[in-house]
Image (cartoon, rainbow, N blue to C red):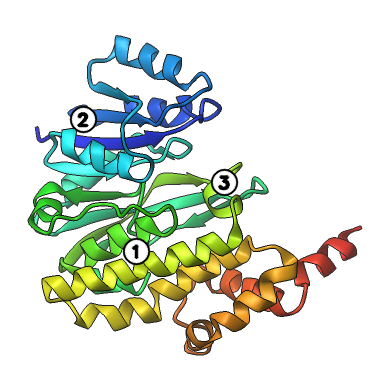
Amino acid sequence: MVKVSIIMPNRNNEKWLNKPIGSVLNQTYKNWELIIVDDHSTDGSREIIESYADRDERIVPIFDPDKPFPLTRNIGIEVSSGRYLLFLDSDDWISPKLLEDALLNIKGVDGYASSYSVITSAGKERLFQYKRGVYSSEDGLKIEYRFGNGNSLLKRSVIENYGIRFPPLRYSEDAYFFYLYLSVTEKIFVSDLVGFTNNRIGSTVVSGGNFEEKFVGTIKSYELLFAELRKHGFKDKIELIRQYGLPRSIVTYLDSTPRTHKFKIFLKYSGVLIPYLLLRRCNSGECPWVYFTVIDSIIPVKGLLRTLKR
């Protein structure tokens, strides 16, 4: 049985930590290691991680790394020993059959992606279920399926051949990593199994922090990505990512931008957003959210809806 390395960064997330660790322990496929890189947590995270590691030798804790998030994920890559890698955030979780389904279907392709669900910040669940089969990696760049943290199995050989690592940036660093992986590969198996839950309750990466830093960091991540693609001879992927990935990232952060600044941000990135909207480049399941978010940046739709509900 081949080994899967699951890499989980954590910082002060004791509220959710039991859920993702438990979801790994409950896997029907048993040959895995869970590497938890805890970045100087000051809550009860360390005690939780140690208690699990004491009970199961497959759990490998790394405390107080000398590099901050997202570089903690790179530390996990360096110490891991599995043929395949999966990245899981410490407030998300996977279904019991995810690894089993992935390893049954990853032969002959470059990676695996499951269907998934999202628990919104309001506590509502949204399901994204795909038709099972082999898709092109280019379909992933067009966001016809999600290839990212939690729902995707990656080949170590691809990561090492191209030196793929997370950049030293807090925002859109995952877009850099996974778009780079898709750009240098050809085929991904996409499953109808709902194998991953993206929990956004209390998430601070999207909803917290300085809104201007999010957009500056996003542009830097994509600039680094484009430079890396040129270096490896994949310049043809750059325009595709400009058309699909970059506007998708901007809409994500536009959604959480303060009301007083939304229109200014929309105007600043209108050259990216308007073609994205007019040409309906958004994934069909996300288009309503995309249009609602952009319209709300021009007219305060959310505020009007809240008023009507009263």
Which residue in the rendered view is the most extreme toward the right?
310
Q: Which residue is mark 2?
A: 32
* Residue count near mark 1 (Cα–Cα under 10 Å), binned few <14, some 14–19, many ≥20: few
Q: Amino acid at mark 2?
A: Trp
Identify the mark nearer the N-term, 2 or 3: 2
Task: Indicate the position of residue 39 as horizontal and vertical percent values.
Answer: 40, 31
Give the residue drawn at x 15%, y 58%: 110
* Residue count near mark 3 (Cα–Cα under 10 Å), binned few <14, some 14–19, many ≥20: few
Q: Amino acid at mark 3?
A: Thr
Task: Indicate the position of residue 23 as horizontal and vertical percent values.
Answer: 39, 30
Q: Secondary structure at mark 2?
A: strand
Horizontal side of residue 81 vs 214, given as left or right: left
Q: Secondary structure at mark 1?
A: loop
Q: Amino acid at mark 1?
A: Lys
Identify the mark nearer the N-term, 1 or 3: 1
**CA distance separating discs 1 and 2:** 27 Å
Q: Secondary structure at mark 3?
A: helix
Q: Which residue is mark 1?
A: 131
Q: Which residue is mark 3?
A: 204
Identify the image quadrant of residue 65. Answer: top left
